[in-house]
Image: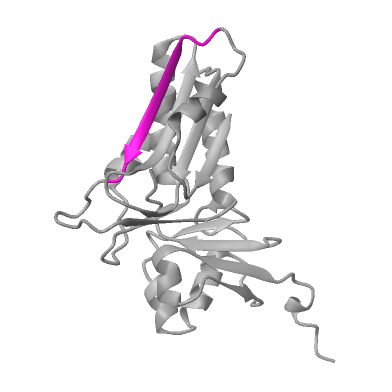
Amino acid sequence: MPSRPLSFWRTDMELRYFAWVRERIGKQSETYQGSALTIKELLDELETRGDGYQAALADRGILRVALDQNIAGGNQSIKGIREIAIFPPMTGG
Amino acid sequence: MFILVTADPIDEASIRERIGTGRKDIGALVGFTGMVREISEGNTSPLELEHYPTMTEKMLTTIASEAIERFALIDAAIVHRVGVLEIGEEIVYVAAASRHRQSAFDGANFMMDYLKTRAPFWKKEGDGNWVEAKDADEDAFKKWER
């Protein structure tokens, strides 16, 4: 009997994009149901979704990621997170 | 504490009235206004400010709280505009109230350095180019780290 996919009990995550990340991907938000466990795995997976995603996500060094609205660093786990936002460095003020 | 993200012009006088209401020990109030300037030479088109609703307000609250704690401020305010802004319009206002002027100056300075690099706002010029983050802003924030 095949084992149950992990996604069976995983909560859907909301992905949100801002500024030029949003423009290049061509959407403000979407639901994520994949199997990535960390920020790096998520970005790697999204990058395979097409040219827009690749253009938006290629420069990992400057991208910022917020997990449930808290800035996250490096290769943090996304387990249990509901909302993941990806955006360029902030330029307010 | 007073935090506001708004598309409307900033009414500094009414914000000052909300700071430290009823307190009799405020000896210094420093208010800073950031204005929209011409970023690229000759570009006179307006600036567009995008933000991350709810995270923005949360971050500004964190920034003002940290300023109050760190500089023993009596009160603090941060108001930031979003949407389309013309050159010459105000974009941000921070205010810090304390017993003495040095902590009020430092508190206002700290809030500006902090919000420029950590509050989720993004500026887009009228020609469609996104304003790039400056290393100098990051350096300015890092000098407060301890």
Name the outermost residue toward the left: B42
Name the outermost residue toward the right: A1
Confirm whether residue B23 shows in the render: yes
Query: Going by the image, does B75 lie left or right of A55?
Result: right
Q: Is residue B101 above or below residue B47?
A: above
**Residue at coordinates 25% horizontally, 46% vertically from top-left?**
B37
For residue B101, which quarter of the picture? top left
- Residue A69, given in percent of the width and then of the height, sits at 59, 53
- Residue B25, given in percent of the width and then of the height, sits at 55, 7
In the foreground, B72 or B88: B88
- Residue B64, given in percent of the width and then of the height, sits at 53, 32
Instruction: Name the image quarter holding the C terminus of chain A.
Output: top left
Q: Is residue A85 above or below residue A43?
A: above
**Residue at coordinates 45% horizontally, 77% vertically from top-left?**
A26
In the foreground, A2 or B135: B135
For residue B105, which quarter of the picture? top left
- The residue segment tinted magenta is B25-36
In the foreground, A62 or B20: B20
Question: Is A71 a magenta residue?
Answer: no
- Residue B12, given in percent of the width and then of the height, sits at 44, 31
**Residue at coordinates 63% horizontally, 56% vertically from top-left?**
A68
Instruction: Name the image quarter holding the N terminus of chain A.
Output: bottom right
**How many numbered discs, if any?**
0
Confirm whether residue A78 shows in the render: no
- State whether the magenta stretch is mostly helix, strand or loop: strand
Q: Is residue A86 above or below residue B16?
A: below
**Residue at coordinates 45% horizontally, 43% vertically from top-left?**
B80
Q: How is the image coloured?
A: one colour
In the foreground, B19 or B64: B19
Q: Is residue B56 above or below residue A13?
A: above
